[in-house]
Amino acid sequence: MGKSTRWFILFCLWFSSIAAQDSPELYKARRKALLNNLGKKNVAIFKAAPVARRNGDVDYEYRQDSDFYYLTGFEEPEAILVLSPRGIYVRDESKFVKEILFLRKRDPRMEVWEGYRLGVERAKSVLGVQAALPIDRFDDYLPALLQNIDTLYIKTKPVGLDEPLSKEMDFIRRARERLYDFAVAHPGKFLNRMREVKDSTELALLQKAIDITCEAHREAMKAARPGMYEYQLEAVIEYIFKKNGSERTGFPSIIGSGPNSCILHYNTNRRQMQDGDMVVIDIGAEYGMYTADITRTIPVNGKFNDAQREIYTIVLEAQNAGIAAAKVGASFWAPAQAAVRKVVEGLIRIGILKGDVETNIRNGTYRAFFMHGTSHHIGLDVHDVSSRGPLKANQVITVEPGIYISEATGRKHGVPPKYWNIGVRIEDDILITEEGPKILSKGAPRTIEEIEKLMSKSSNIH
């Protein structure tokens, strides 16, 4: 194969992947909305996620910073987006612009090893940015960019007094030493409010991620059996993810059986599942950078015993109450408050809690068994940005109550042994609409009857 032919094929593969992405107009509109909020004498800088070294000369799989991607749709590392409402003079083009993307140049030698780069020349047309410059020109533009500004909006991580400064903090220190003083603030002040309400493109990507995750749950229900290892069930799930076009998991898959079902973020997934175990399956496929987050809890042998049925029924009642409370204008905490009440009522009903509902809620006695929050936003991040304000139309949240009774917890609180090592969490992804909450993840069975019926069938994946 000749050199020109090889590069033509590489270009076609790259172009087809770009063409499949959203229109650059979507990202241009987001940048314009943010520019309109920044204020004339302020500047915002967004950096691409760094490449993380795993070990030796092996890197972790690259995943773009969510804010950077939200504003650019660009997935390469070593890039910086600058937004300046008052304008930045680009000497190369003799014009003022309000946005510049600094990115890597094309490098055919490196592309042989690492894959095709977009390059400066194509960035304007493909990404729709007003100006694109090589990343090594960024420092040249800093003096004019930061001169006489009031506030620089940039993401930074807090560091202790005895710790070295992060790259961003060191950059700010040097800029202040060389240039005029300015305040520093997190761009989430504006960007979080934009990201927490999803547009139609985001909702479509989320629904695809959710549909893939629901299919994985259905396959896991059919595949699960005593003697299987947690990682084998994880393999079934993540095969379904990849088979349906998911780039990666949105978070490490949680497959917790028996005593591990009572560990909230357990993801070692090495235990052999036993007859009589419950297994918590908390998973999310990522699709187009957006992630689902859906949990189902199933009996490994396909049949709930009486104790498992009691706990599961309480959690399902709590989830139904939480979903019903997820309405436009309701407090972000309304689903949690509704779910907690049902958990307390249920635990009193089966004798694990004593006394009346209000006293148990006020004293927080339920927290020994239900110790986590009930909802969070999802989107580009599994725990997506949120103002935690009143719920709005086109937000997507989870509703995920649970009850966890480890042997240690059971002994401490005098819980009958039949309930020990039963952990149950049920989580669905909920779209907030003016007509009421919509369950986007209804494709994954969640009632006892539905789960047992599906688990009676066999999986074709072994």
Image: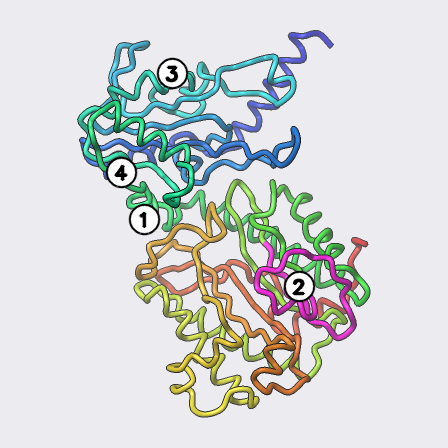
Residue of label 2:
256
- Say which quarter of the image contains residue 177: top left
Q: Give how far across and how far down residue 305 sits, in percent.
A: 71, 81
Classify 10 Å Cα crowding around label 1: few (below 14), some (14-19), many (20 and above): few
- Residue 163 numbered tag: none
Q: Residues within 10 Å of mark 2 (few under 14, many from 20)?
A: many
Q: CA distance from mark 1 to mark 3?
A: 32 Å
Q: Which quarter of the rendering shows the N terminus? A: top right
**Which of the numbered marks, if any, corresponds to residue 184?**
4
Relative depth, front residue between 99 and 43: 43
For image coordinates 67% across by 8% down, the residue present is: 3
Between 405 and 225, which is closer to the camera in this rendering?
A: 405
Residue range in magenta is 256-283
Q: Are marks 4 and 1 in contact (CB under 8 Å)?
A: no
Residue at image point 71% right, 59% down: 220
C-alpha distance separating marks 2 and 4: 43 Å
Residue at mark 3:
137
Q: Which mark lies nearer to you, 2 or 1? A: 2
Position above or below: 453 against 347: above
On residue 193, the disc is: 1
The answer for how far apart the CA atoms under marks 4 and 1 are is: 19 Å
Label 1 residue SS? helix
Graded by Cα atoms within 10 Å as few (under 14), some (14 to 19) or many (20 or more), the crowding at tag 3 reads few
